[in-house]
């Protein structure tokens, strides 16, 4: 890993899931910065973080993406597209049953990945999905199953993917928050991803800073995805000093 090359920040504020939802709402509706732009910014930052976890080189590396139905899943698919563009080989594993319909914006991100990739590899997880040893082929797993809006224990399909990823022995980069970790308390209910590193978007969610979550979070990275400082100011949080040395930073807790 080359995480030690990233700028370091300390005394970083955190937000609850409700606060982050309000910041997202203000960003979209008050500042006219749309979901697609935020998602593309997030995808690029996740891919950059993945490059650091991979030691600085992406070309020729194999990356699995665990893809949930929400925005975290869509961010992850976007990151796979960037990694493919940089020379990686990827597989997107979508956590849904075959009869479930894909929702936006995940459907759009999958369409982009398929169109820009020479040999797109997108599969649906079911009860006969990959074994941990198959995940072990990966040099990196991106965890995009559950985001800050998730509550309670992961569903069966998600739980199966989490267990397989944890047992694979491959390094895991969690997107925004490790799946299965409560965004407000850091507690777990059932299984949870044990990440090598977590790249959180905009600001850390409060649960990431809790002692109970440390073993699941791993190294904590913070990415600027273009949320206006004024959107955070509106909820009483000052972020104006966070990214003065870089837009992807390492948080010292």
Image (cartoon, grey):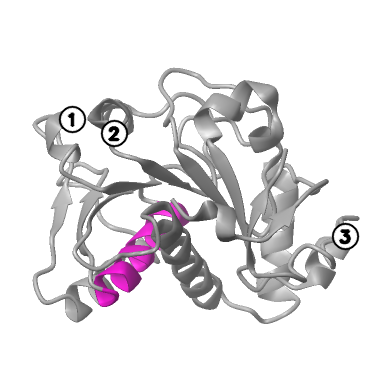
Residue 131 visible in the snapshot: no
Quarter holding residue 111:
bottom left
Q: Residue at x 69, y 74 (%)?
A: 29
Could you give the CA–CA distance between mark 3 and mark 2, rounded to whole angstroms?
36 Å
SS at circle 1? helix
Q: Residue at x 15, y 46 (%)?
A: 98
Please provide percent x and percent y for residue 60.
19, 64
Please provide percent x and percent y for residue 189.
50, 19
Asked if the stretch drawn in magenta spans residue 153, the answer is: no
Q: Provide the residue designation for mark 2.
A: 165
SS at circle 3? loop
Tag 1 and tag 2, C-beta contact below 8 Å = yes
Decide if residue 80 is on the left or right side of residue 42: left
Q: Foreground residue, 70 or 67?
A: 67
Residue 63 visible in the snapshot: yes
Looking at marks 3 and 1 on the same chain, the residue that comes earlier in the sequence is marked by 1
Q: Provide the residue designation for mark 3.
A: 238
Could you give the CA–CA distance between mark 1 and mark 2, rounded to whole angstroms?
6 Å
Total labels: the figure holds: 3
Please provide percent x and percent y for residue 24.
67, 62
Decide if residue 74 is on the left or right side of residue 60: right
Q: Residue at x 73, y 79 (%)?
A: 31
Q: The magenta stretch spans which residues?
A: 70-86
Decide if residue 191 is on the left or right side of residue 217: left
Type of secondary structure dominating the magenta stretch = helix
Q: Provide the residue designation for mark 1.
A: 132
Neighbours of disc 3 within 10 Å: few (<14), some (14-19), many (20+): some
| Location of residue 252 with respect to 186 vertically, above or below | below
């Amino acid at each position: 890993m080359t995480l030690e090359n990233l700028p370091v920040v300390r005394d970083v504020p955190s937000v609850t899931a409700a606060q982050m939802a309000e910041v997202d709402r203000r960003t979209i509706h008050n500042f006219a910065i749309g979901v697609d732009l935020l998602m593309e910014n997030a995808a690029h930052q996740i891919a950059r973080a993945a490059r650091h976890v991979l030691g600085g080189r992406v070309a020729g590396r194999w990356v699995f993406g665990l893809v949930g139905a929400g925005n975290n899943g869509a961010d992850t698919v976007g990151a796979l597209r960037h990694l493919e563009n940089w020379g990686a080989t990827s597989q997107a594993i979508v956590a849904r049953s075959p009869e479930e319909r894909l929702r936006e914006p995940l459907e759009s991100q999958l369409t982009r990945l398929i169109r820009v990739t020479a040999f797109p590899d997108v599969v649906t997880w079911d009860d006969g999905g990959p074994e941990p040893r198959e995940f072990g082929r990966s040099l990196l797993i991106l965890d995009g199953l559950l985001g800050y809006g998730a509550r309670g224990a992961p569903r069966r399909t998600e739980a199966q993917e989490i267990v397989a990823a944890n047992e694979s022995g491959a390094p895991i980069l969690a997107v925004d928050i490790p799946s299965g970790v409560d965004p407000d308390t850091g507690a777990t209910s059932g299984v949870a991803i044990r990440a090598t590193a977590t790249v959180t978007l905009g600001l850390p969610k409060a649960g990431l800073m809790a002692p109970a979550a440390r073993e699941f979070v791993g190294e904590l990275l913070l990415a600027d995805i273009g949320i206006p400082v004024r959107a955070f100011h509106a909820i009483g949080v000052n972020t104006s000093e966070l990214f003065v040395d870089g837009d992807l930073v390492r948080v010292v807790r």
